[in-house]
Image (cartoon, rainbow, N blue to C red):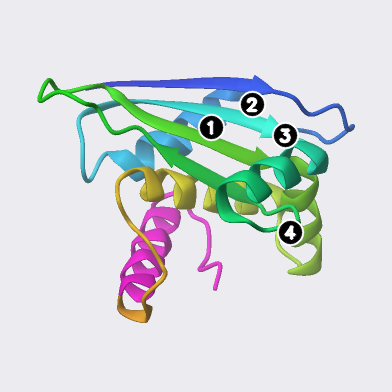
Amino acid sequence: MSFQVHIESGCTSHFELPKEQQFRKWVETALLPFREDGDVNIRIVENDEMIQLNGQYRDKDKPTNVLAFAYHPTTDDPEPLLGDLAVCAPVVVAEANQQNKPVEHHWAHLIMHGTLHLLGFDHIESEDAEQMEQQEIELLAQLGIPNPY
């Protein structure tokens, strides 16, 4: 079993970010039911950078909490890189406060949510959304985090 999580922060706000070991635990928890290895890059961003990314890749002119960019290898060789996550710290904190939940729990949920996207999960169709949400609920419960929905 080999998981690598690389964290890069472009966040200049004075938010208390989770520790690298927390990010690693959340990614590993999401990956373990599906894979025995994988690399995930996580970039923590500010609103401006997230607006740019969300506009460029989703044609939306506003920040969002997390974007997932899955890596699709061009050969049949197994590639440990699953992809990249961009997470907007100001949005994560604001959403947690609006939803009256611990910020750390919301971070965990969004990192797992993004990791599931890297594995191919989606929530465009209602049936897929139900499956993805159920997976998130079960994974979060393993860490003692209540149902985020």
Is there CB contact under 8 Å for labels 3 and 1? no
Residue type at tag 1: Phe
Residue type at tag 4: Ala
Q: Quadrant of residue 148?
A: bottom right
Tell me the distance, in whole angstroms, between the alpha carbons under discs 3 and 1: 15 Å
In x, y percent, where is residue 130?
Answer: 36, 75
Residue type at tag 3: Val
Q: Nearer the viewer, residue 132 or 137?
A: 132
Q: Quadrant of residue 71?
A: top left
In x, y percent, where is residue 64?
Answer: 68, 54
Residue type at tag 2: Lys
Name the residue carrying label 2: 19
Whether residue 18 is visible: no
Identify the residue at the far left of this view. 76
Which circle, 2 or 3, is nearer the viewer? 3
Tell me the distance, in whole angstroms, between the alpha carbons under discs 2 and 1: 7 Å
Q: Earlier in the sequence, mark 4 or mark 3?
A: 3
Q: Which residues are magenta?
A: 128-149
**Screen quadrant of the N terminus:** top left
Name the residue carrying label 1: 23
Give me the residue at 45% from left, 55% from top: 140
Give me the residue at 31% from left, 40% from top: 31
Name the residue carrying label 4: 96
Name the residue carrying label 3: 45
Circle 4 packing at 10 Å, graded few (<14), some (14-19), many (20+), is some
Is there CB contact under 8 Å for labels 2 and 4? no
**Screen quadrant of the C terminus:** bottom right
Name the secondary structure under disc 3. strand
